[in-house]
Image: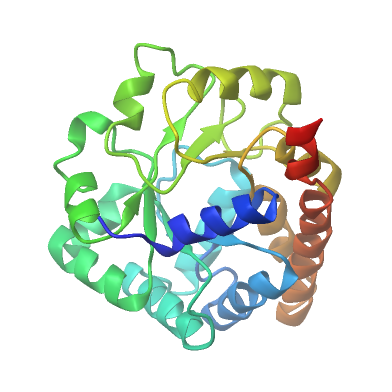
Amino acid sequence: MSETRIDRRFKALKAEGRAAFVTYVMAGDPNYQTSLEIIKGLPGAGADIIEVGLPFTDPMADGPAIQQAGLRALAAGMTLRKTLKLISEFRISDNDTPIVLMGYYNPIYSYGVDKFLVDAKANGVDGLIVVDLPSEEDAELCLPALKAGLNFIRLATPTTDDKRLPKVLANSSGFLYYVSIAGTTGAAAPKPADVAKALTRIRKTTDLPIAVGFGLRSGAQAAEIAKIADGAVVGTALVEQVALGRNDADAVKRVLALTAEISGGIRSVDKKIQDVT
């Protein structure tokens, strides 16, 4: 598999001496055009990698905020086909920022795996996170995705023990997403000491960059994670800003303002200095 945008981005950030800021937003929330404006604005506000949520009717791993975002997007007519179109429109003005499509297998299966992989690659998707496909089902999507040149990113959790971890890492690429707390998205804030202990254990088994998510809401919290991880993932806090917006323009403004604030926290951590000290 050749080097992807995700690989290049983590390599560049390591040389720069800082952690990645990975943002998550729901495709089509609150509508197609506003969603596009948000995604187009994220890199300028400090996002290094963008996870784009694929709306689904039964998002079992997501907390209330992301569930509601998916329902808003579905009500506005968002589909997998339109999500790929959204990413292709983003690519017109940005050919560098990695895009990870995150969601569930059912819409991909319904679309057709072979067709999906061709269209995802053609429209500018770099990686996939499919939360309900375990490693035992690699033949379904993971292996075909790798063959198509897409990173397949897996999740590890506090309950992923040493026996399970190698299976999670098998065929994983791009980065490992460490879910810092047990439960659904946005449920609670992570404890940096617990995360550091977990990452020390995981790094004995893989050289993949590790991005930590679930529960991060501020620049200060993200900075603490940036000290110990290769990336910090923020989703629920950004998605909530869409719902808080008085109108579409205000929603865009709110999401990008919080993105900039959190980016500032992550960028305040110089990992080169940390390595020396």
Residue at (17, 52) in percent of width and height? 144
Which quarter of the rendering shows the C terminus?
A: top right
Q: Position of residue 256 (x, y in %)?
A: 75, 69
Residue furthest bottom in the image: 92
Q: Specify whether residue 163 is in view.
A: yes
**Residue 38 sits above or below residue 277 on the image:** below
* Residue situated in front as seen by the camera: 58 or 34: 34
Say which residue appears at 65% left-offset and 71% top-offset: 43
How far across and down, in percent of the image, does residue 69 sit?
A: 57, 58
Where residue 20 appears, x then y in whole percent?
Answer: 63, 52
In the image, is residue 140 above or below residue 240? above
Quadrant assignment for the N terminus:
bottom left
Left/right placement of residue 186 relative to residue 256 reads left
What residue is shown at x 34% (from left), y 53% (from top)?
Answer: 151
Question: Which of the two residues, 246 or 143, is positioned nearer the viewer here?
Answer: 143
Left of 58 or right of it: where is 225? Answer: right
User: Can residue 191 be seen by looking at this rendering?
Assistant: no
Location of residue 119 in the rendering, given as x and y in whole percent from the top left corner: 25, 73
- Vertical order, 177 against 160 (above or below): below
Q: Looking at the image, is 67 positioned above or below residue 263?
A: above
Quadrant position of residue 63? top right
Name the residue: 69% across, 37% down: 215
Is residue 170 shown left or right of residue 97? left
Q: How many marks?
A: 0
